[in-house]
Image (cartoon, helix red, strand yellow):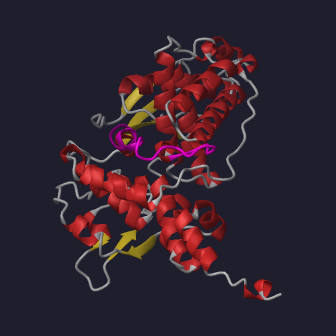
Amino acid sequence: MPKQRKNDEVQCVYYRWILTIRSGVYYADGRSNPTKLGRYSLAVDTREAALQSLSQLDRVKAVENGIEDRSILDLQASTLSLVEGWNLYLASVEGRQAIRGIRFRTPKRYKPVRDKFIEFCRKRNVTQFGQINKARVLQYGGWLDEEAYAYATVYLELTTIKQMVKYLVEEGHLPASASFKLSLTKPDESDTYCYTPAEVGAMLHHCQTTQDLKWLHVVLSTLVYTGMRISELATLRWTDLELDATDKRIRLIDERHSAARRKAGNARELKGRRSRHFPIRSELLPILKSIPRSQDGYVFHGSGGGRLKPDRVRTALIRDVLTPLKSQFPTRPGEALGFADGRVHSFRHVFCSICANSNTPEQTLMSWLGHRSSKMIKRYYHLHDAASQTAMAKVDFSAVINE
């Protein structure tokens, strides 16, 4: 993390700025100028990158205040780097969140998209926005598909890139010729594969009996028995668990408005902004109690003992579990998806389906999962053959038979 500099004054071409750092991120304060310019996040964590973004911000403010013609931005746009453009966009998102109600974690959600896209372009010697067009974005989408990312992820990332380019054009960071149209179909129904009970059992047994995958067994077991999102599981702290109380439960608290947590840089932000709690299954209790306590306060860690990263769980699941076991569970003829197409989020579908098949009240299940609408429950619910056969056997056709 960069060291705090007191009154780090920077005189750019047009204005004087003060660089500050908060939670490891650089901010530019231009309120000391005769024209009050405000305070902006530069969305970077190094002084070198901050100075690059600040130079562009200085030009933008000069145009906005009538000091310079917009042409200075057009001249700069042809050589606008991907890093600088992304940082400008993330800074704008962070600045708008307070007045437009955008979730606090939105910029954080976009940063992995930025890093992945920039790395993809770097390997193809693409470093500037002058090299980005519709064909390049579609190529990136094809790469995501080849890497087995779900369509919802592909949709999110391509939409984010499209919105970023639109913003940069509208604000004069890029010329109008850089814009492009890209029609994407928003995913309405979930195409996530839901593992069968037999498949879940085989995966857990495989992880439990493989020394290098015991850490993953703990993770997958918790996902099965709680229905938590992997992002929620990765941020779970020991203080969220009530293991010794009479009513043993897990408490997930949305901490976006906690000043102390935000200052520490570890505020949990739940999807839907809804805090919730749910009981701990008896099968899960000994698994949780067997986990060694770490000084960082978090429950789950990766294979090397470091903080658990959701994307590494995804990689390990595909490489070390689904691939070795896929021959045991081949995709059925005529089916588009099978066992090998399942992902980490599939365990949330498993939890929802098992609960629904066990006649768990809908409102209770919505509370456990953190959903506001029963529509989402229907999206997650899958009726497997065994449950379907049992349900059909209970249907009374006597009235028809006796006709």
Count of marks placed on residues: 0
Q: Nearer the viewer, residue 34 or 194?
A: 194
Q: Which quarter of the picture shows residue 279? A: bottom left
Please report the bounds of the magenta region as a residue range: 317-338
Residue 336 counted in the magenta span: yes
**Does the image show residue 12?**
no
Nearer to the camera, 349 or 80: 349
Between residue 202 and residue 275, name the one nearer to us: 202
Rendered view: 152 above or below 264? above
Q: Is residue 294 left or right of residue 301?
A: left
* Place of residue 63 in the rendered image (x, y in percent of width and height, measured from the top left): 67, 24
Q: What residue is rendered at 50% in x and 10% in y?
A: 125
Q: In the image, what residue occupies the spot 60% across and 18% down?
A: 129
Against 84, is 35 above or below?
below
Q: Can residue 112 be found in the magenta stretch? A: no
Residue pictured at 22% horizontal, 47% vertical: 210
Q: Residue 215 appears at what percent x and percent y?
A: 24, 51
Report whether 2 appears left or right of 100: left
Image quadrant in which the C terminus is located: bottom right
Residue 93 in the image: state x and y as whole percent: 58, 42
Outermost residue on the front side: it is 402
